Image: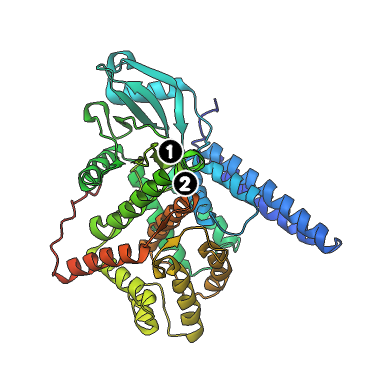
Amino acid sequence: MAPKPPRSKLNRLARLGSLTSRVSGSYVGQRVKGIFQDPDGRDAALNRLHLANAERIVDTMGALKGAAMKVGQSLAIALDGVDLPPEVSRILGRLHDSAAPIPFEEIRKTVESELGQSLEDLFLDFDPEPLGAASLAQAHAARLKDGTPVVVKALYDGIEQSVDSDLGALRSMLVTGRVLRRDPKEVTAIFTEIRTRLMEELDYYQEAANLESFRASLADMDGVHIPRTHPTLSSARVLTMDRLTGASADVFAAQATPEAKQRAGDLLVKSFYRMIYKMRALHADPHGGNYLFQNDGSIGIIDFGCVKRFDPYWIADYARLALAFLDDQPQAAMDYCRRIGVLHSHDSESERVLWELGQTMAIPLHADHYTCGASKDSVTARLAQIMPQVLRHSDLRSPPELVYLHRSLGGTYALLRKLGHGYNYGDLFRSHAAHAIGVAEGTIKDQAVPLPVG
């Protein structure tokens, strides 16, 4: 067991500042040493440094939990599949599921204080060993008085106070350290979006409402399971829900039959498109730890704290933008990029880079049957080559709506790659895009289940 994460603003700032200084200083030192090293020795030393710094980042952010670790998780998702040494990707991936748990007595204190009774009075039994320790909360298995298996999530004590201090410190370090060489307004908008989602994740009444809304919206999808909540055993800081079982994405991909993996991939991509274009409410944390896979390919989706909602007119424009890239209409694509806030100029070189980016992202939609991860000229490898060009153009920006949409897109694609999933993604996308556009134009009745906004 680990001690509670530090709550003091000065304590957390000191740890984050020390981390930044050590990482930045190590690269400065290596640049100096590299002058005196041969190319092979320089490359080997730099690779060792990448590994050491990845370990430092994971250890510090994992201990701090809170906003610091959540931003680290977003970074890990963004880097998934990019051309990094496999060991670095593996280390960063630990941010998803290996936060050090806090002592059980702290969890007991929170649950009993929030629900007003002892654990013994509330539950038939309550396992002191956590199922998982995440950046904001810890989850424990329990059974209701009638024997129903449940999961109880409890926020860490004082975690709410860490959000603003952690985000402020990280933003300052990334900007002043020239790690993020972007327009200050863009950076501010992105961090504002991250803060909004984090504050929603700290409200378990909101997450309980999300769970029930998604259960209703996906109820007709055979093979997709979402936990039922137990309101009388929940509060703003404690959430009790039915326990779903299943294998992790890695275990399932290694052991499942081809038929089961195909079904699981079908359900993943169909639920993803439905969420974006029909529900306009997206499960925005799609890493492997939030999906549970059954032997028959059915999937359980958990952790609905991070949900991104979309305006119907914005999502229709996003669908039109994607169609323009897919249908080889560069002028229309650039017009829609300006309309949704991606392109802020008429610079021809920026348009060329943006067109190449859009065409790369559309690769899976062009083929009659595309298998994720099968091509040597993969989407992720090409994106790794293009993104440095994109970042050099300050007029190419990520509007707040895209922060979690593309995070979710990347996470879903990473899961499909693990499964080796093949599908006619183009036809599936076109049908959903047509629905979103039809709703915005008033030619299709909107049947989305309204989701509550906290």
The residue tagged 2 is 70
Q: Which residue is drawn at 73% across and 50% down?
A: 48
Which residue is more in the foreground, 338 or 278? 278
The residue tagged 1 is 136
Location of residue 317 in the rendering, given as x and y in whole percent from the top left corner: 29, 71
Determine whether, in the image, residue 358 is placed left or right of residue 222.
right
Label 2 SS = helix
Three-letter code for the amino acid on which mark 2 is drawn: Lys
Disc 2 crowd, CA 10 A, few/some/many (<14, 14-19, 20+): many
Q: Residue at x 48, y 67 (%)?
A: 184
Residue 305 to residue 380: above or below? above
Q: Residue at x 27, y 30 (%)?
A: 234
Residue 385 is tagged as none
Three-letter code for the amino acid on which mark 1 is drawn: Leu
Q: Can I make out residue 395 in this image?
A: no
Q: Which residue is drawn at 39% across and 51% down?
A: 195
Location of residue 266 in the rendering, given as x and y in whole percent from the top left corner: 35, 52
Are the residues at dot 1 and dot 2 in contact (C-beta closer than 8 Å)? Answer: yes
Which residue is more in the foreground, 228 or 37? 228
